[in-house]
Amino acid sequence: MHYGRAQPKNLKQLQEMLHCPMVELKCEDSLSTILSAKDILRNSEHCCIVTETAKSDKKLINIKHLYRKRRVLKKVKKQLTQESPETRAVLVGIYPSLEDPTCLYELQTNASIYVNNNILPSNGSSLKRVIKYITEMMLGTNPTVGGLALILRR
């Protein structure tokens, strides 16, 4: 298993689900994440960049983290696929957390619609569901995900 400079939490179960080396996203230093991913892709056909999105009990802070990290992952995806056109990249949602993943699904596909309707929690009043839906449309991701992953394959 390969990680960037900092050793993340125990992600053994996630690595077993993905079957590939992982790098943890560093939002403040995305260049080191890109370099780590390129290094792995030189020796392996695939790798995964992971990040935790739900770090707080406060929902607004989690939404802010989700937005920021998704934006950075999209930037990393764009840079890696432009530099190496043979690289394929898929953005994946992880629920409920990186340490204990139950569900992995590709974002903004039929899979994400299925997961949102049948697997992710839909508790609360109609107003809460509408707010969650609007938030999901703005972010492109359900706000209840515990992590995001960018799976790269060459």
Image (cartoon, grey):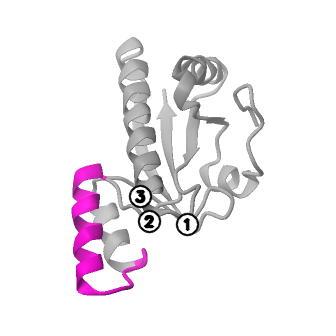
**Numbered label attached to residue 80:** none
Query: Does 44 appear in magenta?
Result: no
Task: Provide residue 124's location: percent of width, then percent of height.
Answer: 36, 85
Q: Earlier in the sequence, mark 1 or mark 3?
A: 3
Give the quadrant of the N terminus: top right
- Marks 1, 3: nearer the viewer: 3
The residue tagged 2 is: 144
**Marks 1/3: CA–CA distance:** 17 Å
Task: Provide residue 40's location: percent of width, then percent of height.
Answer: 64, 24
Q: Label 3 neighbourhood size at 10 Å, few (<14), some (14-19), many (20+)? A: few
Task: Provide residue 117's location: percent of width, then percent of height.
Answer: 31, 76
Which secondary structure lies at badge 2?
loop
Residue 86 can be seen in this image: no
Q: Amino acid at mark 1?
A: Pro
Q: Earlier in the sequence, mark 2 or mark 1?
A: 1
- Marks 3, 2: nearer the viewer: 3
- Marks 2, 1: nearer the viewer: 2
Query: Does 130 appear in magenta?
Result: yes
Front one among 107 and 152? 107
Which secondary structure lies at badge 1?
loop
**Marks 3/2: CA–CA distance:** 11 Å
Start-end of magenta stretch? 119-140
Q: Label 1 neighbourhood size at 10 Å, few (<14), some (14-19), many (20+)? A: some
